[in-house]
Image (cartoon, grey):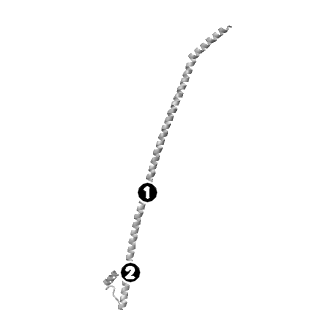
Amino acid sequence: MNINMTFLGQMITFALLIWFTMKFIWPPLNKAIEERQHKIAEGLAAAEQSQKNLAQAQQSVDAELRAARTKANEIIEQAHQRANQIVDQAKSDAIVEATRQKALADAEIAASANRAREDLRKQVSTLAVSGAEKLLKREIDANAHKALLDELAAEI
């Protein structure tokens, strides 16, 4: 056995192995590697796009929250204004009712005072007639002297 022949045989076998590998094994393997790289690149692009979409969604959520807070503050402010209006209306209604009650009380007091004056005038006229009767020692006819008694009551 000659070492050169063995070496030549190994070189031919190795060359056939390289050719076979380059012709039948390397293209599918290279294609699989390229597909894998392509899928990884697509995945990274999709992840980047998802990050952008997430950032946009977060911004829109923040904008919606600000708008909702603004709207809620406006509603609260309107409620406060309405409550103040209701309180003011109740105050004015209470003032009107108090004024009306005071006017009724004043009218009732005036009517009572007038009744008391009339009663007092009648009592005074009765006492005056009684006193005059005693002074004159005779009876005075109240019906006959009604005009005189009314005039006396008006003066009192």
Of residue 144 and residue 62, the one placed in the foreground of this image is 62
Q: Is residue 133 above or below residue 29?
A: below
Within-10-Å neighbours for mark 1: few <14, some 14–19, many 20+: few
Q: Which residue is at a point 55% across and 23% down the rendered structure image?
A: 33
Residue farthest along the front direction in this orientation: 4
Q: Where is residue 40 in the image (x, y as percent from the top left)?
A: 54, 28
Q: What element carries label 2?
A: helix
Q: In this view, does 12 lie above or below 149?
A: above
Q: Position of residue 71 (x, y in %)?
A: 45, 47
Kind of residue at badge 2? Leu
Q: Which residue is at a point 43% across and 57% down the rendered structure image?
A: 84
Give the distance between the C-alpha atoms of the residues marked 2 and 1, in whole angstroms. Answer: 52 Å
Q: Quadrant of residue 2?
A: top right
Front position among marks 2 and 1? 1
Residue underneath mark 1:
84
Residue underneath mark 2:
120
* Quadrant where the C terminus is found in the figure: bottom left
Q: Which residue is at a point 64% across and 12% down the rendered structure image?
A: 10
* Quadrant where the N terminus is found in the figure: top right
Q: Position of residue 46 (x, y in %)?
A: 51, 31
Left or right: 88, with 39 as reference point: left
Q: In this view, does 6 lie above or below 79?
A: above
Q: Tag 1 or tag 2, which sits nearer the N-term? A: 1
